[in-house]
Image (cartoon, rainbow, N blue to C red):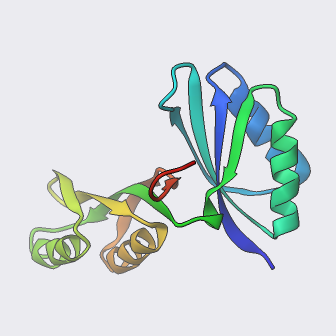
Amino acid sequence: MITKHTISILVNNQPGVLQRVSGLFGRRGYNIESITVGESEEIGLSRMVIVTNGDDNTLEQISKQLYKLVDVIKVIDLSKNPMVARELALIKVNAEPSQRPEILGIVDTFRAAVVDIGPSSLIVQTIGDSDKIDAMIELLRSYGIRELTRTGATAMIRGAIK
């Protein structure tokens, strides 16, 4: 059964590692739905969080292939555990002064924030799981979305890890 998987990959913080990891996915025909990369808690190591789709066999193959890369230290399928996943989106929406109270009602409902106000637009920042962001985008579409950018998911397992 094809399901969404969130994979955490601990890698050496070296030039070219991101290219090698993403290239591995592309060469094998696996799609990356989102990818985030940043420094980890250990000096010299970065953590990649990749969201991809596939069955358990596909995920096992991805994991085996990743471990063949020299700079890969650890691969964890976060989806197999209770996890916290968050994404950030910036949404520039058409907002004439007469429409702003309605838009601000949506912003408040989603516990989002207005981070910029222009003469005929607002930039809204929202943080949450992908479903929350998708729902907010859908509600703002009727006002006209001028620009949209999303970070992709970042995630970690809840509680203590052993």
Q: Position of residue 80 (x, y in %)?
A: 65, 66
Q: Residue at x 20, y 67 (%)?
A: 95
Figure check: 21 above or below 127: above
Among the 4 quarters of the image, the one containing residue 53 = bottom right
Name the side, left or right, on which 144 lies relative to 159: left
In this rendering, the answer to whether 75 lies above or below 89 is above
- The residue lying toward the viewer, choosing from 84 and 22, is 84
The image quadrant that residue 124 belongs to is bottom left
The percent position of residue 56, horizontal first and vertical second, equals: 82, 68
Report the quarter where the N terminus lies.
Answer: bottom right
| Rendered location of residue 116, percent (x, y) | 19, 50
| Furthest-front residue in this view | 162
Residue 84 left/right relative to 109: right
Whether residue 104 is visible: yes
**Who is closer to the viewer here, 152 or 44?**
44
Number of marks in the rendered image = 0
Does residue 26 show up?
A: no
Left or right: residue 56 compared with residue 131 = right
Residue 158 position in % (x across, y down): 46, 59
Q: Give the residue drawn at x 30%, y 75%.
A: 143
Q: Is residue 6 above or below residue 100?
A: above
Q: Of residues 6 and 32, which is closer to you in this image?
A: 6
Q: Is residue 86 left or right of residue 90?
A: right
- Please name the residue shown 35% across and 71% down the image: 144
Q: Residue at 47% of width from left, 50% of height from top? A: 151
